[in-house]
Image (spheres, helix red, strand yellow):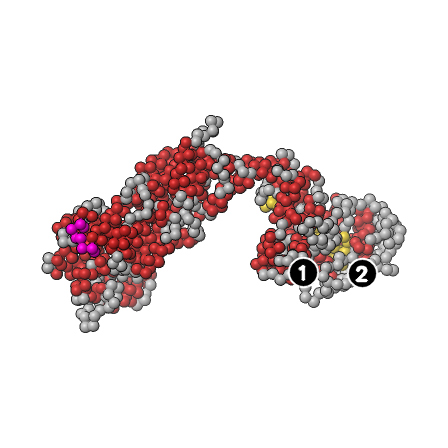
Amino acid sequence: MLREGSPLPLDAGPGRTVVSAVARTGETAPGRPGPAGPPTGASAGPAEGGASTGPSGSASTDPLGDPFLRTRTVLPARPAAFLRRERLVRHLDRALETPLTLVNGSAGAGKTLLAADWAAGLRQPVAWLTAEAGEHRPGVFWAYVLQALRACGTPVSDAVGAPAEASRVDHTLLARLAAELEARERPVVVVLDEFDRVTAPEVAEQLEFVLHHAGRGMRLVLVTRTEPLLPLHRYRAAGELTEIRAAELAFTPEEAVVLLERHGLSLPVAAGRALVDRTRGWAAGLRLCALAARESADPEAYLKEFEAGHSTVADFLLAEVLKRQPPQTQDLLLRVSVLDRFCPGLANALTRRDDAEPILVGLHRENAFVEDLGHAWYRLHPLFGEILRAHLRVSLPGLEPELHRRAARWLRPRGPLTDTLTHAAAAGDWAFAAGALVGDLAIGQLFTGLRSGDLDRLFSGMGPEAAGPATELVRSARDLARWDVERGLLHLRRAQERPAAADRPAGPAELLSRALLETLAGRLTGSLERAERAAEAADRLRREVPLDLLDAHPELTALLLTHLGSTRLWAGRFEDARAVLTAVTGGQGTAATALPRHEAMGHLALIDYLDGWTGRAERKALAGAAEAERFGLSRPGVSGLGLLVLAAVAVDRDEQGRARALLDETALLPSAARDPVTAAARALVGGRLLSARGEARAAAERAVPAVSAVVASPWATGHEALATAAAHLAEGRPERVAEALESVSGGQPASAVEAARMLLAAGRPEAALGLLDGVRSGARTGPAVTVRMTLVRAHAAYRTGDVATARRLVAQALLDARRDRLRGPFRDARSWIRPLLSTAPLDGLAADWLTPGRPRGGAPAALVAEELSGRERDVLLRLARMMSTEEIAADLYVSVNTVKTHLKSVYRKLAVNRRNEAVRRAREVGLV
């Protein structure tokens, strides 16, 4: 049986490297003796001349009469490529301050060489003893302890005696030994290596007796794979225990790189980190990989891609860990190797036995590469798991899919859904996987959430042979998530046509999942009736689904409401759309709902834009972009609607370069050609940008959305009509403008105002003003609409010669447009408004934001739309003194909220957005 410190007899085979090496790695401190030669204060063999002769006879033999083996009482030699790790040696130095030290780790963790290297650097005697396999005779054990003390030059006196029998030791001997050690001026360090081989419980009891009564005369270091049968809790509670365990023994990436350099391999830290991740910093694994990589033509590639099941590492672990276990334990390890983590119940489901709990507890205690995750869950060391899976496929061919199937069925009612799906997919049981996804109400996770990409890839392996309503729903969801409308609707129809099993009718979770996809189908086909019908069905079904299941999947409701809101927006029902979309943005802001929240913000931004609230639209679009950035949304499901709104706002501000760049960002998104609202928004922005450049005919052609819908959208149709009318005007056909605008009514304020502008330009002022009079007024109409409406009325007055009214209306329009920098309406009116803007006070109102600046000699402009109150002037004066809101409130003896209210009024009257702009504007007009 191989143990740490023994050569590895790894037989050569096809594609293998013959390695005979000690798989150990350690570290020492600067100034300590080098790895060659015996340690300070330790003899290379049994002490000569100083040994006593006890009842057992000669000091050169044990109680069985066998000669003492010198190799058991000398420090193991360190290999030439040995790496001293200072952090571990410093930690082990604490062993000189505590009675008991435990170095506990798996086979090949580097325990023995760490202890040997540390011991070699000490300036006091170290008694070293390596236990033998099956060490169960107390008399032999204590005879070797006494021999180790003699070997390091610190023998005990003849009064202590020696064990006379192999199977027992006299208690008096132990008491004399403890008393003599306690009386020494300097403590002796005793290192018991491979202590897990000592199987006799009475030895542990005797050792604890000696350690306790030796007091400061003994420092005991146990090097072991398992927990020793000593009362560690008492030593730990008293602060008398030093511990170094597997996590600390593991190599860091930096240490791994240095170790590889010792083997002639130069690798970057990133490559070392990848190797450490795979081996978990296991010392023997790193050394064996390094030895094998040296024989490869491309060592770095080998270390990245080596097959664990066909390597020297596999030879070591199979011989050192697996084959030393009893058959039932070997069988369990092979079967659980298909699992990332497991508990006794899950392991029993794979073995179809009921003995997993004691086996797993024992394996963890033995450090047999089984890690305890807490709460009775375990996992295999990743490299060990790889090797076991490869061994499973050879020793039990064809069993792996069945093991995955058993795991999926055990996990379905007990474990995470992702684990159930992973194992069902690995078993090729797609009907079960789809049924679990749909039954858990998790179909929305194919659209949104951190696992959406993983789920999509998992179900990409589902072939056409998988049948049933659940599989068709999953296929439909995957297609619709990629905006493949035709295929998605085909699978949705098949899901409705394929009956459920007679013994398992469709449950509420399946019907609710279908309702979600039906709502999305209504959105993508522009069918409000279909979406509303599905949403009503979903509302009824939610009452039949367990509340905890709904709470676990907030994405389903968020997605459903987003799709419904999008369909309502398409149909022109802005307020109804706003209601459900606001419910989405006000919901849980988690990764699960990130995509619907992002989309809902984009839709709300578009509604605000179409209602004329460009500032609000911009803020919501930016909030949607922040939501996407926060959760890293970059998959095809992102609609890009927020970018289109930002582009539209840029057009209204006459920032054509920015608008073009934003529009181009959405060109490659699948939603640009498949989602009706997104396609219509893109057509609207593209058309307005071309129109702003004077390309009226191209704008008319671009205004038609590249998407088919069951029912046309009134606002999208209105935009098409406007673009067509604009083309008629530009091409000298004013008589055809009214005909093109017949579909535009006052129920669409933004379109109606723009239509009135074109009718006026076409020489039909009565029709233009009549259309304006029919526009529904109210709080929902924003500056972008009211500014255009004011300019149309100003133009009408200007045409009749009422210049005074025209100037007053233009002034009002300038003040209303200034806050949101709405240059677009004035650009469209440039043919008649330019002379007015060159005269005072309109030139001042337009200066700096609409026109380059005030003409020389121009009179100062009345930049204040409304007179400031006395209290507002007080606040403004203190604002100019750089006082904070709190300081202004204290100075005026008012509340902070009162100051904020005055500030809002000041900003509005000065047509600014910020404190510094208010102060600058106030100085321009002489208020401060």
Quadrant of the image for the C terminus?
A: bottom left
Q: 194 or 287, which is in the foreground?
A: 287
Q: Earlier in the sequence, mark 2 or mark 1?
A: 2
The tag on residue 647 is none
User: Marks 2 and 1, Cα distance to the nearest angstrom?
Assistant: 31 Å
Q: 743 or 449, which is in the foreground?
A: 743
Q: Is 694 positioned to the left or the right of 601 in the image? A: left
Q: Quadrant of residue 675?
A: top left
Q: Is residue 414 magenta?
A: no
Q: Secondary structure at mark 2?
A: loop
| Bounds of the magenta segment | 730-737
Residue 638 at least partly seen: yes
Mark 1 lies on residue? 263
Q: Residue at x 75, y 63 (%)?
A: 36
* Percent coordinates x, y for residue 178 in the rendering: 78, 53
Instruction: Identify which amino acid the numbered label 1 is placed on.
Output: His
Q: Secondary structure at mark 1?
A: loop
Q: Quadrant of residue 5?
A: bottom right
Instruction: Identify which amino acid the numbered label 2 is placed on.
Output: Ser
Q: 614 or 634, which is in the foreground?
A: 634
Q: Residue at x 41, y 33 (%)?
A: 496
Magenta stretch, main secondary structure, is helix
- Most extreme residue toward the right is 57
Q: Quadrant of residue 844?
A: bottom left
Q: Residue at x 75, y 45 (%)?
A: 199
* Percent coordinates x, y for residue 859 in the rendering: 18, 70
* Percent coordinates x, y for residue 139 in the rendering: 82, 47
Q: Residues within 10 Å of mark 1 (few under 14, many from 20)?
A: some
* Percent coordinates x, y for residue 653 in the rendering: 28, 59
Mark 2 lies on residue? 43
Say if 288 sits above or below 573 in the image.
below
Foreground disc of the pair 2, 1: 1
